[in-house]
Amino acid sequence: MGKFSVLFCISILVAFGSVINGSEEEKIKVYELKKGNISMKLTNYGAHIISLFLPDKNGKLEDVLLGYDSAEEYKNDTSYFGATVGRVANRIAGAQFTLNGTHYKLVPNEGKNMLHGGPKGFSKVVWKVKKYKPESNAPFIIFTYHSPDGEEGFPGNLHVAVGYTLIGDKLSITMKAKALNKATPVNLAQHAYWNLGGQNSGDILSEEIQIFASQYTPVDSQLIPTGKIESVKGTPYDFLEPNTIGSRIKQLANGYDINYALDGSEKKKMKKVAIVKDKKSGRVLELFSNQPGVQFYTSNTLNQKGKGGFVYKPHAALCLETQGYPDAVNHPNFPSQIVNPGKSYKHYMLFKFSTTS
């Protein structure tokens, strides 16, 4: 990983005066990182990304992430706009699993299943700012959180750190976690909602996407993986060659919400995950990661007022959540997400931004 794995940091900018559990240290604040003509705002509430401004082919800056105007509004968010999700991202069937002979019952928050760590997942807690260096040549911020044994039903104490760094035309995100005393599943993800035309520009169906995955993990009616890993060939999930998001979306009930088994994952090294292009604005996003999977989601049920009072509708954005496979704790054939005591979880993402005419 080299320089990308060292990128973490943070401090204080705008305080909204919100205090959680009466602690002065836990005020919800906003932090800004800026490099060249790329700028972003983040909050220590849920380690969310609030905004990311990128230039189009003519140099015009637009915010390309869905979200809210203030950090306070994320407290009532149910869409996970720009959130850090965990302890286990995505779904766990029946909100339960067995590990080393012990059966763990979790807190369900999507019917009988658990989604994105439960009702009080990592997106619903106030993180500490360990370092913040906005004036650095590579401006960065590092958020940390201590997840106690038994939180939402998960075993063991877990120390988590999430770092955001701007390096030229790139955004590096590093997620690390260390199991302190018990084996536990860990699967963190960044839940940014991207619209390269601008957060208030309408739907993303005309955006072109390429996903470097020959296989995917089919799901049942509750979006729980069946345990199979199948080829994308001949299905609407085949984006091995670039195609518009809307080209085959009508073949699906609501849209895309599926995990891809990324090619080359067995090497556990950085690999290209996807490329997204918006022809009108000329903006291009390239995503790299060391994780085995990526959840491609097209905001299928959105109906939410966001920034500037703009109402986000279905397909207003796309999510590319690099991750371990969903429900891996209940499928031994999936890559394991178990972290043993004293061992660490490391998740790297690199977003490269550019424009094309």
Image (cartoon, grey):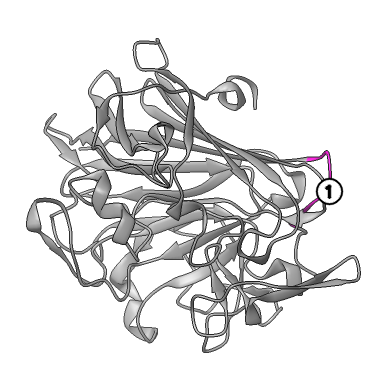
Up-down relation of residue 321 to residue 222 (above or below): above
Q: x and y percent of residue 85 in the render?
A: 50, 54
Along the viewing direction, whichever of 305 and 153 lies nearer the viewer: 153
Main secondary structure of the magenta stretch: loop
Up-down relation of residue 8 to residue 246 (above or below): above
Is residue 322 something that shows in the picture? yes
Along the viewing direction, whichever of 58 and 332 lies nearer the viewer: 332
Q: To which quarter of the image does residue 126 belong?
A: top left
For residue 356, side relative to residue 255 (left or right): left
Name the residue at 69% across, 61% down.
154
Is residue 332 something that shows in the picture? no
Q: To which quarter of the image does residue 137 belong?
A: top left
Q: x and y percent of residue 129 in the render?
A: 46, 28
Q: Residue furthest left?
A: 309
Name the residue at 69% across, 74% down.
229
Task: Please state, as top left, top right, bottom left or bottom right, where the C terminus lies in the image.
Answer: top left
Amino acid at the residue labelled 1: Asn
Figure disc tally: 1
Secondary structure beneath dot 1 equals loop
Span of residues in magenta = 337-343
For residue 274, side relative to residue 3 (left or right): left
Residue 133 in magenta stretch: no
According to the image, label 1 marks what residue?
340
Q: x and y percent of residue 21 in the render?
A: 42, 47
Task: Please state, as top left, top right, bottom left or bottom right, where the N terminus lies in the image.
Answer: top right
Name the residue at 13% across, 55% down.
201
Up-down relation of residue 127 to residue 65 (above or below): above
Q: Crowding near pointer 1: few (<14 within 10 Å), some, many (20+)?
A: some
